[in-house]
Amino acid sequence: MATAPVIETAPSRSAGVPSAPRLLVADDQPFILEALTLLLRPEGFHVETARTPALVLDCLQHQEYDALLIDLNYTRDTTSGTEGLQLLQQIRQSFDRLPVILMTAYANVDLAVEAMQRGANDFVQKPWENVRLISIVKAQVELYRAHRRTLMLEAENDMLRADGAPEFIATAPAMRPVLNLVRRIGPSDANVLITGEHGTGKEIVAQTLHRLSRRSHRTLVAVNTGALPEGTFESELFGHVKGAFTDARADRIGRFELASGGTLFLDEIANIPLRQQAKLLRVLETGEMERVGSSTTRSVDVRMLSATNANLRAEAAAGRFREDLFFRLNTVEICLPALRERREDIPILAAYFLARYTARYRRAVHGFESAALQQMLHYAWPGNVRELDHTMERAVLLCTGDQISSADLGLHVGTRTSSANLDDLSLEAVEAVLVRKALARAGGNVSHAAEALGLSRGALYRRMEKHGF
């Protein structure tokens, strides 16, 4: 009669490589399991045991391990090794990298070699030599952990941004409540919802919150959820296992695992489809998730920062956003004012961007003509700080003197959008006007604006980036 696996309690695992290796030892003889537990526990391993192949597979569905130490035979008086080979095959179908070390009697060495050809990593003979067994287990675990560290580094490298975090420039009175909130809640683990129009600096606030937190030693993982196709949403956030779908040629670490122990920033969160919102809510409530194609539950520990330009309360009331997810996300809400509401910051921001782009393009431009500065102060800046950034880059490239002029800025102050004067605008300027009007009519909702323009959401994001919105 099969017995339940003996599970020793151990600290929960955080992202990346755990502090102590976890082993699953499988054998049908209780005294073997006891002996191996007594041998390996003092070596710093967390040991769990199972007495049948079915229990091994069950354990693998509910826990992560750094190595398996399994016997080839589980039925009394059977020495064929068929059970062990079948178990190995089943393990390899879902866990192609997990180290599997076989235990076999002297008479089964040829069988063990065959098993290694089928995917086992190593074998030990019964009765084993303690020093050799410990050495094999430690070597396989270290190789596996090194592989996992490599995967994490590769994933983090994919996420690397340009050197140097952007400065959080905020001196206007309208920004004082924002600064006070950032200072108070930055060091906490509270989930924060950052709201404001496109281009107001929501990602910079998220980066500042992360730098002030106790998680600042970890990577801030940022995801523009609005730009993710629904078909890849789960794979991007939760990862996938090899074979989960047609193009899944290898295991992939998702953003939640990559951010575990640190901060995850989800931008444009209002655009997440309802079906995916339920899965996101579950991770936030339980700290547990599964990769696509796997039933193994993984624990993650992330601080959630999210951002949107939409009114999530209104979206929830209209049934387009889950109310329970909304409450989970906005433990604290930070609302960023538009640039036109903090005009005192315009000269400082403009000077900051000017210094950045004169250095990047090696241009000898040293300031602004008075008329150019006045034009910036009176312009509405519908694209906010992002538009100012793009405007300064263009101005530096176009400037022919040693100061930025009004003509260099290229701002259409007071331009009306009637059909009468659209004829006087370039195709690019007309496109900018149409995009701006569509976003305004949609209340900033990118999905609705894209639908009105007959574009995909990704195409609209590209145009918004192009025009500095």
Image: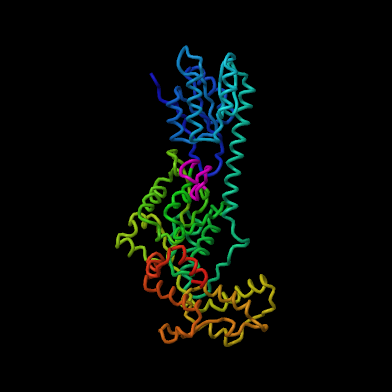
Relative to 170, 321 lies left or right = left
Which residue is rendered at x = 67% and y = 83% of the image? 402
Which residues are the magenta region?
241-257
- In the image, residue 391 above or below residue 233: below
Q: How many marks?
A: 0
Report x, y in % for residue 142: 61, 35
181 vs 118, nearest the viewer:
118
The residue shown at (59%, 33%) is 141
In this rendering, the answer to whether 129 lies above or below 97 is above
Residue 469 location (% of width, % of height): 48, 71
What is the residue that sits farthest to the top in this orientation? 77
Q: What residue appears at the point 52 percent right and 43 percent down from the top-left corner?
A: 249
Q: Quadrant of the N terminus?
A: top left
The residue located at (58%, 76%) in the rendering is: 392
Up-down relation of residue 374 to residue 243 (above or below): below
State the image coordinates of residue 85 (x, y, percent, origin top left): 51, 24
Q: Is residue 245 magenta?
A: yes
354 above or below 241?
below
Identify which residue, 169 or 80, lies in the foreground.
80
The one of 331 and 319 positioned closer to us in this rendering? 319
Q: Is residue 9 magenta?
A: no
